Image (cartoon, rainbow, N blue to C red):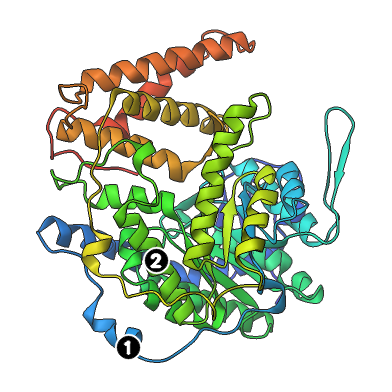
Amino acid sequence: MNPPAFRTGGVVVTAPVPLRIRGPEVDGGAELFSATTLYFVGELVDRFAARRAELLARRPEFHERLRAGARPDFPPESRSIRDSEWRVAPPPAELLDRRVEITGPPERRMILHALNSGARVYMADFEDAHAPTWAATLRGQANLVDAVRERIEHRGRDGTTLTLRHPHAALFVRPRGWHLEERHVERDGHPIPASLFDFGVYFAANARELVRRGHGVYLYLPKLEHAAEAELWAEVFRWSEDRTGLPRGTIRATALIETLPAVFEAEEILYALRTHSAGLNSGRWDYIFSFLKEFRDDPAAIFPDRAGLTMDRPFLAAYDRHLVRVAHRRGAHAIGGMAPQIPIKDDPAENERAMALVRADKEREVALGHDGTWVAHPGLVPLATEIFDRGMPTPHQIDRAPALAPVRAEELLAIPAGAVTDVGIRTNAHVALGYLESWLRGIGCVPIDHRMEDAATVEISRTQLWQWVHRGAPLASGGRVDLARVRAALGDEADRLAAQRRAAGAPRGNGRRPRMPRVFHSPCLRDARRPGRGRSRR
């Protein structure tokens, strides 16, 4: 194989697929994108992009059945998988103990803090915590090349240097989901799948080096909706291992169960990935968003304020119990959900209240049987570790967790009751616009009110506003949610953000204040005066 050389910003001729790089020049891009890497990405696109498009075309079927009055259930056609005896491949030694995992974007400083945090796993996130500008995506991949080779360091503006300590967390990578595209790379004038780009570049650049160092290629798979989508990933993994001469099972992937369709096929998703499985994860924030999106045409499915969507709600408790039961039944890890809280240094009383929420959540998870959990900030690693050390003295509890009863479909579909309030409206406006303002500047993971917000949590905020306006949700204070009320909250929040920028020295008239509400109104509140006729757009 002698693929041609390449230059970022030019046309890349590879066999079997010509790829055009439309992104601008980025420092280090040419070094990262060897011709061999692009050849590999081109082969992935040629072999798997068409099947990915077929599977995406099937996604609306779930919502259309729901809209027609059918209730979701565990698919009868795959009952034989659920009823038969099988187990996933046992985890490699370095993944036996995953009691605390930390996630964050693939930024150099974040990577070092996360790998050095004391967590067992760091997940470098090209998805919900990543604003996918071309420069940030390429730099993220270049950062991971250095992290894999343990030569990564970061020099701060104050002259201090961060370096990698030993031992450090195991490295996982989350590529973007099947539904997203990388518009800076085209095949025949069309953007290529972002998932194949992210995986292909990381695998081609690092797989052999990881194996040489005694590791595997460890991934998280986001936004799966059906087992067929997991099977496509398994095909990608098998082909990639064979293509590079690596042993079967070098690639291990944890599947996030974070959509309503996927929770009904969690067992089938594990089965599809069984040779390459690294367990299941409770992607609860995206799961709430998915529930809202799928039930968008049901006038009775009005969710209460986001603050009230806690894991003790019956539909979320059933979801979490189902995930643990399925994973353990099949010999797989069950990893708990994200704690988004951030330590509050200048307010001890408020910090204690925030840490009490984290403590209660992690104690609930370890008691339920989870083998690990997620945190968003290095400052939470010691607390989560202490809780899991106390509740889980073994590396995991796959074989010792309490037996859990099967979960019924109606338990998973219980609509949560509760109040919609003016505070809830303003909180959602505050979070959604605050995140959008940062996202437009290329920042995909944002601290807001001492919580780490990313695309998953913000989807809930903006989708709730859409739902409340479309359904004229009754307010606890009287009256109903309408477009004028939400627009007022968005306008107030935009003014507050503009004032913050001016106070920080940002130039006036940069267009950001009027732009944000327009961008937000388009996908969130379109057709809001006609309840039930708008569409939820992602």
Amino acid type assigned to the residue bearing label 1 in the image: Asp
Q: Which residue corresponds to the image point at 37% horizontal and 73% vertical from the top-left?
A: 227
Q: Earlier in the sequence, mark 1 or mark 2?
A: 1
Q: How far from the left and from the top, in percent, is residue 27? A: 75, 42
Residue 492, quarter of picture? top left
Q: Which mark is residue 350?
A: none
Q: Which mark is residue 321?
A: 2
User: Would you say 485 lies left or right of 175 here?
Assistant: left
| Of labels 1 and 2, the one closer to you | 2
Q: Nearer the viewer, residue 462 or 332?
A: 332
Q: Secondary structure at mark 2?
A: helix
Amino acid type assigned to the residue bearing label 2 in the image: Arg
User: Would you say 169 lies left or right of 294 here?
Assistant: right
- The answer to whether residue 459 is above or below residue 116 is above
Total of numbered circles in the picture?
Answer: 2
Q: Which mark is residue 83?
A: 1
Q: Nearer the viewer, residue 301 or 502?
A: 301
Residue 144, quarter of picture? bottom right
Q: Which residue corresponds to the image point at 77% horizontal and 54% vertical from the top-left?
A: 31
Q: Secondary structure at mark 1?
A: helix
| Residue ranking furthest to the left | 69
- The answer to whether residue 495 is above or below residue 327 is above
Asked if residue 445 can be seen in this view, the reply is no
Per the model, the C-alpha gap separating discs 1 and 2 is 18 Å
Labels 1 & 2 near each other (Cβ < 8 A): no
Q: Which residue corresponds to the image point at 48% horizontal and 26% vertical from the top-left?
A: 434
